[in-house]
């Protein structure tokens, strides 16, 4: 798997943790809110740390290199 793919997967899992955190508040079941809070925050923090550890390089670096190989692409597709 490429780093960009891993970055996207970890980002989705971070947002899933936030969704678990918000679930009892959005549904009105506040009896289990502390459990969901701990699970949601734990998931978001763990996958956030994994995203930082395993995805060192940023995807923009690789995109800039690929655009150097294809000079015929319009300038609007290039990042600065």
Image (tube, rainbow, N blue to C red):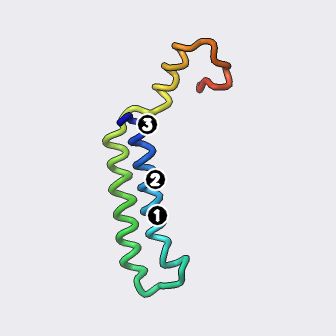
- For the residues labelled 1 and 2, the Cα–Cα distance comes to 10 Å
- Residue denoted by label 1: 18
Q: Is residue 5 above or below residue 72?
A: below
> Does 65 sit left or right of 41 as displayed?
right
Residue at image coords 38%, 42%: 6
Toward which corner of the image does residue 17 lie, by quadrant? bottom left
Quadrant location of the C terminus in the rendered image: top right
Q: Is residue 29 above or below residue 11?
A: below
Q: How many marks do you count on the picture?
A: 3
Mark 2, residues whose alpha carbon is within 10 Å: few (<14), some, or many (≥20)? some
- Residue denoted by label 2: 12
- Of the image marks 2 and 3, the number of the one nearer the N terminus: 3
Residue 51 image position (x, y, % from top left): 37, 46
**Tags 3 and 1 touching, CB below 8 Å:** no
Residue at image coords 67%, 20%: 75
- Residue denoted by label 3: 4
Residue at image coords 51%, 26%: 63
Residue 39 image position (x, y, % from top left): 35, 69
Toward which corner of the image does residue 37 lie, by quadrant? bottom left
- Of the image marks 1 and 2, the number of the one nearer the N terminus: 2
- Of badges 3 and 1, the one in the foreground is 3
**Tags 2 and 3 touching, CB below 8 Å:** no
- For the residues labelled 3 and 1, the Cα–Cα distance comes to 21 Å
Element class at badge 1: helix
Element class at badge 2: helix
Numbered tag placed on residue 41 in the rendering: none
- Of badges 1 and 2, the one in the foreground is 2
Residue 65 image position (x, y, % from top left): 48, 19
Q: Is residue 67 above or below residue 26?
A: above
Mark 1, residues whose alpha carbon is within 10 Å: few (<14), some, or many (≥20)? many
- Of the image marks 3 and 1, the number of the one nearer the N terminus: 3
Element class at badge 3: helix
């Amino acid at each position: 798997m490429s780093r960009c793919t891993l970055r996207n997967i970890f980002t989705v899992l971070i947002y899933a943790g936030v969704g678990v955190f918000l679930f009892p508040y959005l549904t009105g079941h506040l009896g289990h809110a502390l459990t969901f809070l701990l699970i949601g925050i734990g998931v978001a923090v763990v996958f956030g740390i994994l995203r930082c550890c395993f995805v060192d390089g940023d995807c923009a670096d690789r995109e800039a290199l690929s655009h150097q190989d294809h000079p015929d692409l319009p300038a609007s597709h290039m990042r600065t």
